[in-house]
Every structure is written in structure tokens, then in C-alpha cells.
Amino acid sequence: MRTWPNISGIVLRASVFALMLIVAMGAPAEAHHVMGGRTPSTFMDGLVSGLGHPVIGIDHLAFIVAIGIAAGVAGINIAIPSLFIAVSAVGVALHVRGVPLPGVEALVALTVLVAGAAIALGRSLHAGVWAALFAVAGLFHGYAFGESIFGAEASPLAAYLLGLVIVQAVLVTAVALLARRLGPAAIEPRLAGAAIAGIGIAVLAGQMLPA
């Protein structure tokens, strides 16, 4: 009979393998549009877009997985990742209001690389360091999230933010619980961190190198 740690390791490895496979297939790292490029015009449109955006964006999804692993393995308070979610809402607001923030996509990829590398190296970072990384990354990821809701009315915008909060909170919590079951000595989280760092490198290279 399989134990929970074994199942957790399989799920974690499969999730990161899926992320790497998407990158290998050349999935774009730019801001994604769940609504096919159409600005959400209703509450339901906004909600669906908010729920889907972090999932279809490979760089965003990789960072969310990294947050969950860090929360589970490093033993930090599960409330600390909420900084990322809260600040990402601020980033969305900045984009919607037209505040310029250059180099966002490259900075998003850089946060993925840094978080993945920290996990892969197995460094015991202070909770304050993780909190700072989550907060800074939240600003950049949130600004990128704002691209697909730019120009929307208040109702779909509010629904979009609600969807972002829900999907990110669920994903972070689920990954954190899986990682916590594995324990800090397990090799799977470090392998996952290496894969996430690889995603960051691939996406960053795609942003910086000519097509």
C-alpha cells in the first residue's frame, strides 16, 4: 500500500514535469487571455478570466508552485504566501490605472528563477526573506495579470480579482500540503525547485533573446 509521502512525491514530480513539458513545447510566456483576447465584460467573464490566468501562464503557475513548496518545506507560516496574493492585486490595479512598469515579463521570469534556485539549493532562508520575495514578485506578476483585464468595467474587474485570489490560494495551499507531507529532507522538493528554476531561465531567455 502506498503511503501519503510517496503519493505526494509522485504528484509533485508530475506537476513540475507538466510545466517543463509546456515550456519545451514552446508555450508563450507573455500575458495570456482566457477570453481569447477579449476584455471581460460581465462578472462571470471576469471570474473565469481570473481563475484561468495564473494557470495558463507557465511563468505564473511555476512561481505559485514554488510558493507552495517553500511554504511546505521551509515550514513558514502558511499566511506568508498571502503577501504574494495581496500585492498581486496591487499590481493589477497599477496596470489598470495605466502606471508604467517596464520590463515586467523579464522580472516575472527572474522571480521564478530566484525562487526555484532557492528551493533547489535547499537553503534555509529566513521567513522574512521569503516574505520579501513573495511581495516583490506579487507586484510584477500582478502587473502582468492586469493586461487581460485592462479597460474592463468595475464588475468584471472585481470578479477578476476574486478569481485570482481563489485560484492562487487553492493552488498554494494544495502544493504546500503536499510538500509538507514529504518533509524537508525529501529530494522531490529540491528537484521541483531545479525544474522551476529551469522554467525561469527558459522564459527569461525567451524574453531577452531575439526571436
Image (tube, rainbow, N blue to C red):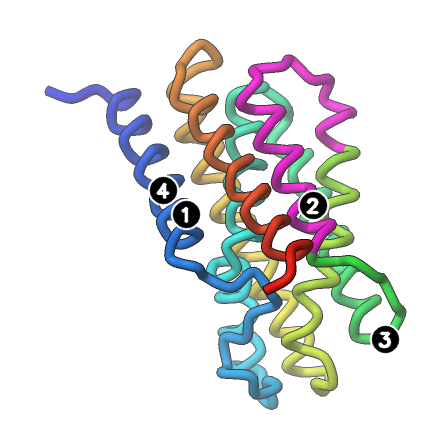
The type of residue carrying mark 3 is Arg
Can you identify the residue that label 2 sits on? 84
Q: Give the overall secondary structure of the magenta segment.
A: helix
Can you identify the residue that label 1 sits on? 19
Of callouts 2 and 1, which one flags the residue occurring earlier in the amino acid sequence?
Answer: 1
Q: Which residue range is magenta in the image?
A: 106-131
| Image coordinates for residue 2, horizontal then vertical, percent | 16, 22
Marks 4 and 3 in Cβ contact (< 8 Å) = no
Image height of 6 relative to 32, above or below: above
Marks 2 and 1 in Cβ contact (< 8 Å) = no
Marks 4 and 2 in Cβ contact (< 8 Å) = no
| Image coordinates for residue 158, horizontal then vertical, percent | 68, 74
Magenta-colored stretch includes residue 20: no
Q: What mark, if any, has residue 97 been given in the picture?
A: 3
Of callouts 4 and 2, which one flags the residue occurring earlier in the amino acid sequence?
Answer: 4
The secondary structure type at the circle numbered 4 is helix
Taking the view exactly as shown, the residue that stands out farthest to the right is: 99
Callout in the foreground (3, 1): 1
Q: How far apart are labels 2 and 1 at the CA level?
A: 20 Å
Magenta-colored stretch includes residue 130: yes
* Crowd band around label 4 with a 10 angstrom C-alpha radius: few (<14), some (14–19), many (20+): some
The type of residue carrying mark 1 is Leu
Callout in the foreground (4, 3): 4
Can you identify the residue that label 4 sits on? 15
Residue visible at 51% across and 37% down in the picture = 198
Q: How far apart are labels 3 and 1 at the CA level?
A: 32 Å
Residue visible at 56% across and 15% down in the picture = 122
